[in-house]
Image: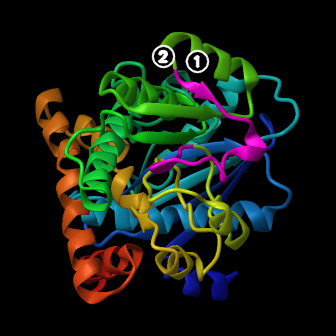
Amino acid sequence: MFAAMRAEKMQALHLFTDPATGLEAIIAIHNTRLGPALGGSRYQPYNSLTDAVADAMRLARGMSYKAALAGLEQGGGKAVIIRKPHVDNRAALFEAFGRCIESLRGGYITAVDSGTSSEDMDCIAQETRHVTSTTEAGDPSPHTALGVLAGIRTAARHRLGQESLAGVRVMVQGLGNVGYALVELLTAEGADVMVADIDPGRVRLVVDETGAHPVALDAVYEAPCDIFAPCGLGGVLSAAHIDQLRCAAIAGAANNQLAEPGSADRLDGRGILYAPDYVINAGGLLHVALTHQGITANRIAERVSAIGNRLATIFEQSAAEGRPPSVIADRQAEVILYD
């Protein structure tokens, strides 16, 4: 375990149980140089504790890098709550998790993530004030989508030479809260949007409401498009999938999109522009962090829109140095976190 922590430069790892509710949770804290760790609570099933810990650590590291490049005075952390087939009392489980967070005395602030909701955050808030994304604070998904839209505009400008998204073909993979909101924003700007999701009912709803074109799950990677936007779970850009892609750029909301160490070089070798995930999807983090600090909605929107400018700098430096954008972004974040 310590070797894995050293490999990720992890600062701390906390494991919690609560027999009364069946809670089994992990809080990974990657780096607190800039401030208290902030990151969502993921509620998902895992094949093993090892898998859950590895996921928490990878996600926590991404949050540190995300906060650093977003200009936030926050560290990076992530919580993973292992989802069981059945839970007797979900509210009690999240209240128990709130007590776990409180035991860290402000060292970790949580928010919504995959599998959790603002109502779950309300339960956590019964036991600790170190939580955001409550029903009062609001859902961060719209700001995540807004930041991804800004990133897609930058990718289209850099790779396609287009200032407008009108007529740009975008393949959106994953129609959760962020993916759904992104499709609405893209269609409003005249983009030609294709969609796919594991839930066929969700696809039908999005198609009916936005006019997007449905694509079968097994045809997503081979679908001809200008921009591929992964907006589901991570690890989607494996060698096999990269070889199938028929796009000019990748710009989406999913975390940890690169499945393997060589994925960035493989994309670069194919001439596919990649918007580093923790840069383009930082809108949600900006929302939760700045809302927690009492910053106004207009000011938050301004900070989210600046994601496009950050990506433009990364793309320009990548072209000048002949190195993948993800390498440039990592280096920029590490200078802030470690130098």
Q: Nearer the viewer, residue 212 or 60?
A: 212
Residue reaching furthest to the top: 208
**Which of the 4 image quarters holds residue 69?**
bottom left
Report x, y in % for residue 163: 19, 45
Q: Could you tell me which residue is drawn at 38 percent across and 36 percent down?
A: 145
Q: Nearer the viewer, residue 286 or 12?
A: 286
Regarding residue 82, the answer to whether it shows in the image is no
Circle 2 residue: 210
Amino acid type at circle 1 is Val
Amino acid type at circle 2 is Thr
Report x, y in % for residue 108: 43, 54
- Is 84 displayed left or right of 216 in the figure? right
**Which of the 4 image quarters holds residue 136?**
top left
Give above or below for 327 relative to 140: below
Magenta extent = 212-231
Tell me whether circle 2 and circle 1 mark residues in contact (CB < 8 Å): yes
Q: Which quadrant does the C terminus fall into? A: bottom left
SS state under label 2:
helix
Give above or below for 116 relative to 274: above
Q: How is the image coloured?
A: rainbow
Say few, some or many: other residues with alpha carbon within 10 Å of mark 1 (under 14 / 14 to 19 / 20 or more).
some
Say few, some or many: other residues with alpha carbon within 10 Å of mark 2 (under 14 / 14 to 19 / 20 or more).
some
Query: Does residue 67 show up magenta in the picture?
Result: no
Report x, y in % for residue 284: 37, 41
Q: Spatial distance from mark 2 to mark 1, Cα to Cα?
A: 5 Å
Circle 1 residue: 207
Q: Could you tell me which residue is drawn at 30 percent across and 38 percent down?
A: 165
